Amino acid sequence: MTASERISQSFPNVIVFTYVLTLVILSFCEFCGGILMIIFNTIRGIPLAEYLRIWRVKSSRTVLGASILGGPVATACSIVGISFCGSTYGNCIIGLTPVITAILGTIFLKEKTGIRVFVGIILTVAGVVIASIAPPEGVSHFYLGLIITAAAPIGYAIEAIISTHAIDVSDPLIVCPLYRMIGGSLIELLCALIVCAATGHVNWITQIFAVIFSEPIILLFLFMSIIFLTIQYNGIYVAYSYCGATRGSAILFSTPIWSIPIGIVMSKMGIISFSVTTLGILGAFVIVVGILIVLAKPSELFNLRDV
């Protein structure tokens, strides 16, 4: 987001551009992250021929389809939405992901759920309502941001279900860089080109890359994003493999509570502007409690899922 804000200073402040910029940055970071992960895999002894073998496994290709929901829909909408409503509040909406994943996982993956899951769902939804009651100071288009971000949990949940099914027969650390990162990055760039062509702003793409490579500070922020994005993507795919879509999502999307201390620290350092209300903090806390309940017993958090 920090890199996006710096780049957007040279462009019109419209939602269409914000969406295109998000897609371009995601494409750049995911492509570089995928290459980085392939290099890491090569160092740890995985030959490049293994990616060709995975490509021949038809079910693994469904991750490429899932990346459309995870990238152009979920991640792009979450970043655009958070730019309007703020990090903590956007992450509270995204915190609904484990709830939707639990419902879909019960239907399609036959994951075991019970009354505890439904109590967690109720708490999570209540936390979102509490956090969304009133906007913090200095945040513009608060409710618009919440609406845009609402597309994210749906996209992430469906991606989790599809990806978990695919990695049952493939190594997640090979599938993720090949399909979710490199494949997804190409889809995101294509989507950006389509939007630009439809709105008559094809030159936006080249202008964005020109700004990126002309300012070292932006490249630094993007390099940091690439590192953490690579860890996040591959980590969550491993989590899907070991503990299932619902629990994996709950681990990843506990971000509402973490966004508060991180946001405060980065604000004190002058990197970003950050503010949060008491209701926002309370809502984030309730959401995380709800997510933990969705996980079932905390002692089972990192157990292999029952397949």
Image: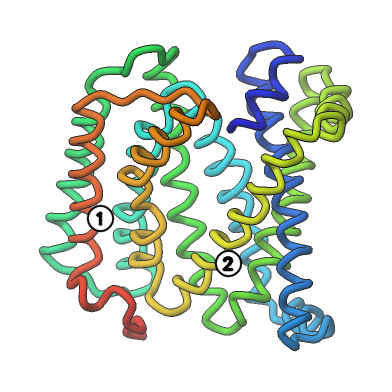
Frontmost residue, 70 versus 211: 211
Identity of the residue drawn at 25% across and 55% down = 291
Give the class, few, some or many, for how many residues have Cα within 10 Å of label 2's Cα (few <14, many ≥20). many
Q: Amino acid at mark 1?
A: Ile
Quarter of the image with the N terminus is top right
Q: CA distance from mark 2 to mark 1?
A: 21 Å
Q: Which residue is mark 2?
A: 234
Residue 221: x and y, percent?
Answer: 67, 40
Frontmost residue, 276 versus 28: 276
60 sits to left or right of 295:
right
29 sits to left or right of 123:
right
Looking at the image, residue 169 lies above or below residue 162: below
Frontmost residue, 6 versus 78: 6
Identity of the residue drawn at 59% across and 58% down = 66
Give the tally of numbered discs: 2
Mark 2 and mark 1 lie on one chain; the one further toward the N terminus is 2
Please, what secondary structure does the residue beneath circle 2 have?
A: helix
Identity of the residue drawn at 58% across and 62% down = 231
Identity of the residue drawn at 54% across and 34% down = 79
Looking at the image, residue 207 lies above or below residue 61: above
Residue 102: x and y, percent?
Answer: 30, 61
Looking at the image, residue 162 lies above or below residue 112: above
Q: Which residue is mark 1?
A: 291
Q: Amino acid at mark 2?
A: Asn
